[in-house]
Every structure is written in C-alpha cells, then in structure tokens.
Image (spheres, rainbow, N blue to C red):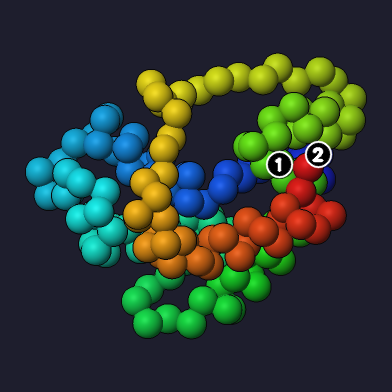
Amino acid sequence: AAKDCAFVTLLRDPVARFVSHYNYLQRRHPSPSRPTSLADFLDTPDAMRLASQYLFYFAGQSLQPGQNPAPLIARAITALERFDVVGDLSQPHVFAKRLQRYTGHCVPLWRRNVAPVPTEIPRGLRPRIEALCAADITVYRAARDTRIAA
C-alpha cells in the first residue's frame, strides 16, 4: 500500500548507542528506580531491553532472558533488506549522499539529540555491554557489511 513511500533508517554501533541511550535517560528522564551507575544498570532487565533495540524495531520483539536470538536476528536482517536506504551514523555524509541519489534532492543533515559530551564507553564495561548487545551487534554488522548499508 506504500508504493509512493521509501523506507529509510540510520543505524548506530549498538554498544555506543546503548551507552548513549543510558546517559540520555539519566540526563533527561532520571528515575529513582534506575541504578545511577552504568555498571549497576547492566544487571537490570531494562539493560537487556535497551541492548536489543534493533530486534525490537526490526523483528518486533526485544530479546528475553534465555531466549534463542537467532530467529529474531534473522527476522531483523530480513526486514532491513526491505529498506530502501540503510545508513550508518558513523558515516553521516555517506548516508546523506545515498539518500540524495535515491531521492534526487539534497537532504540537509540535522543534528538532534546531541549529547553534551561525546559518548565514552568505559573500557572495563565494554565486554559486558557487548555481551548484552550481541544480537544487535550481529544485525548491525550484517547491515553494515552487506549491500544494504549506505
């Protein structure tokens, strides 16, 4: 039904996105129920939900504890293959050029939701965050390393 529509998305490295999203929540939506340290947050159910955002958006479900991620990963990758343009936030100008070629129009690069300081991933927490984000990392790499990434 959407013949006059194009489907476009912009992905970000899942580990950086996870840390940035946590920092955003702490900055803009503080909650007494959320741990104030990233290290403590990693042990919460919300961390798993936050770590599987690509599965949620592209496969329709966040990863649940003990669930096999393979079917959701496959569903997310299949969904991304149907997008007209998939970009990588680490290369915004490549994305903008691809979008311009696709639409035939110059597309302005907007900067929204910019953190006050660049996202830093604590070296000691990286392995734990990567483990939490493993399914989203697989989806991200598939998009980046195949023809679908801009």
Q: Which residue is mark 2?
A: 4
Residue positioned 40% across, 24% down in the render? 117
Residue 136 location in percent, x, y?
A: 54, 61
Q: Which residue is mark 1?
A: 87
Picture quadrant of residue 150? top right
Residue positioned 27% across, 30% down in the render? 28
User: Is residue 107 or residue 114 the one in the foreground?
Assistant: 114
User: Is residue 128 or residue 20 the one in the foreground?
Assistant: 128
Is residue 92 at all visible to an observer of this figure? Answer: yes
Query: Number of callouts in the render?
Result: 2
SS class, disc 2: loop
Amino acid carrying label 2: it is Asp
Residue 107 location in percent, x, y?
A: 75, 20
Cα separation, mark 2 vs mark 1, equals 20 Å
SS class, disc 1: strand
Amino acid carrying label 1: it is Gly
Near mark 1 (Cα within 10 A), the count class, few <14, some 14-19 or many ≥20, is: many
Q: Is residue 52 above or below residue 9?
A: below
Residue 86 location in percent, x, y?
A: 72, 45
Image position of 14 (left or right of 5): left
Q: Nearer the viewer, mark 2 or mark 1?
A: 1
The tag on residue 136 is none
Is residue 99 at all visible to an observer of this figure? Answer: no
Picture quadrant of residue 36? top left
Dot 2 or dot 1: first in sequence order is 2
Image position of 96 (left or right of 41): right
Residue positioned 55% across, 20% down in the render? 111
